[in-house]
Image: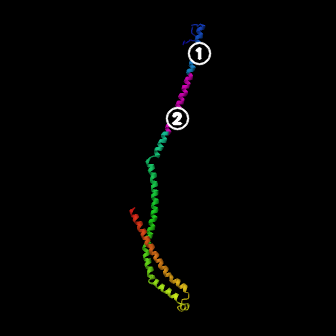
Amino acid sequence: MTIIAVGSSTTMTTEELIKAMEDLRLQVSELKYDKEKLAKLEISYDKSKVTVAEKKREVKALENKVKALEKDLSLDKRLGEIRGILWANINESISNVWRSIQIIYEQIDLIVAVPVEIQRARNILGHKPEQANRFIHFLNTKTKEELEALEIRDRTSTILTIKSVFTMRTLMQNLERKSQDMQVEVSYFLEKFTVL
């Protein structure tokens, strides 16, 4: 490659001039090629800068996501949720048990009151059930005239009134049985409750 000085005092031949022109064309085409290559490199560099920036943003976003996930996965938060669930279940169980305890103590109060009421009913009844049987037998064996002489106008209603003694006796016996059943249930519950 020869450099031609413009405005120099040396003269050139046509062949030299053509050769110099060819050299210049070669230099221009090399320069053009180098410029294109430089432009491609600049574009590639710009793309790589954009890619690097994008990658940096992606890395930053991933780091933030990892931090958020680490926070979500922390034991404190999970333990807090578990505690909340456990306390909700415990409170529900306690309220259910508390209702049972209240019912048991109401039954205990009834069990204490029942013997008093049964004794009162026995005192009221006394020997009336045996007397009621005899009295019903007496009413059934008398005629209408004999009953009117005793001032008993309606045999059926009188017998029904007397039979209320039997109803009261049956009620008393049922109450006694129910009281014993309740006593067994309360004892069973209290045994289970003391285990807790």
Whether residue 83 is situated above or below residue 120 in the rendered picture: above
Which stretch appears magenta? 35-61
- Name the side, left or right, on which 103 lies relative to 7: left
Q: Position of residue 128 (x, y in %)?
A: 46, 84
Q: Nearer the viewer, residue 168 or 33?
A: 168
Classified by dominant secondary structure, the portion drawn in magenta counts as helix
Residue drawn at x 44%, y 53% is 83
Check disc 1 and report the residue beneath it: 25
Check disc 2 and report the residue beneath it: 54
Using a 10 Å C-alpha cutoff, classify the residue at mark 2 as few (fewer than 14 neighbours), some (14 to 19) or many (20 or more).
few
Q: Nearer the viewer, residue 195 or 54?
A: 195
Q: Quadrant of the N terminus?
A: top right
Whether residue 65 is situated above or below residue 159 in the rendered picture: above
User: What is the count of numbered marks?
Assistant: 2
Which amino acid is tagged 2? Glu
Q: How is the image coloured?
A: rainbow
Which amino acid is tagged 1? Arg
